[in-house]
């Protein structure tokens, strides 16, 4: 089973955060197991870096370094799972479960994992707790 990396994990691994050393070690230790993302992670990753830039958490060089590192990972070691209309349909059904508190973006991550049979690996506690309720295996790191 592939481990699908969500945006929170990759942002932590590729920018300077408290969990960065732990996430870098975790990614390096699990590359041989078949890690994956979707193109949605690519969009969210860029958006998260823009937020960090606006908030002063990173500078332009830090943003460029993180984007380069991400691009290198998906060009070689991390598979990118394609998105289809089906994933958005599944995400809508998952988001309909209002008690989970899922945001649309989180529902899309879970939909991709459900469809590809992947385990969601995340630092997001709410997302990790919603997954099993919706039939998606999750790993909170």
Image (tube, grey):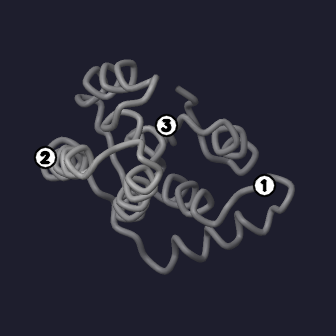
Depth check: give the residue in front, 77 or 24. Answer: 24
On residue 33, the disc is none
| Precedes in sequence: disc 1 or disc 3 | 1
Q: Residues within 10 Å of mark 3 (few under 14, many from 20)?
A: many
Q: What residue is shown with label 2?
A: 76
Q: How far apart are marks 1 and 3 (CA)?
A: 18 Å
Give the mark, 2 or 1, whose residue is nearer the N terminus.
2
Q: Which of the two discs, 2 and 3, labels the residue nearer the N terminus?
A: 2
Q: Position of residue 107 (x, y in %)?
A: 62, 60
- Residue 91: quadrant of the picture: bottom right
Q: Where is residue 60 in the image (x, y as percent from the top left)?
A: 24, 52
Task: Give the answer, above or below, for where 3 lies relative to 94.
Answer: above
Residue at the image position 34 percent from the left and 67 percent from the top:
82
Disc 3: which residue: 121
What residue is at 19 percent from the left and 45 percent from the top?
Answer: 65
Give the x, y percent position of residue 74: 21, 51
Q: What residue did someone put label 1 on? A: 101
Element type at mark 2: helix
Q: How far apart are marks 2 and 3 (CA)?
A: 19 Å
**Viewer-closest of 126 and 110:** 126
Name the quadrant containing residue 73: top left
| Disc nearest the viewer among 2 and 1 | 1
Alpha carbon separation for disc pair 2 and 1 = 34 Å
Element class at badge 3: strand
């Amino acid at each position: 089973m592939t481990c699908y990396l969500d945006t929170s994990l990759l942002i932590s691994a590729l920018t300077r955060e408290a969990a960065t050393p732990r996430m870098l070690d975790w990614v390096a230790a699990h590359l041989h197991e078949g890690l994956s993302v979707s193109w949605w992670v690519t969009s969210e990753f860029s958006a998260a870096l823009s937020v960090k830039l606006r908030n002063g958490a990173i500078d332009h060089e830090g943003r460029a370094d993180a984007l380069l590192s991400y691009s290198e990972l998906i060009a070689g070691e991390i598979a990118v799972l394609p998105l289809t209309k089906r994933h958005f349909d599944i995400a809508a059904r998952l988001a309909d479960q209002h008690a989970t508190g899922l945001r649309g973006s989180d529902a899309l991550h879970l939909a991709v994992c459900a469809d590809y049979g992947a385990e969601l690996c995340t630092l997001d506690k709410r997302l990790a707790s919603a997954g099993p309720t919706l039939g998606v295996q999750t790993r909170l790191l």
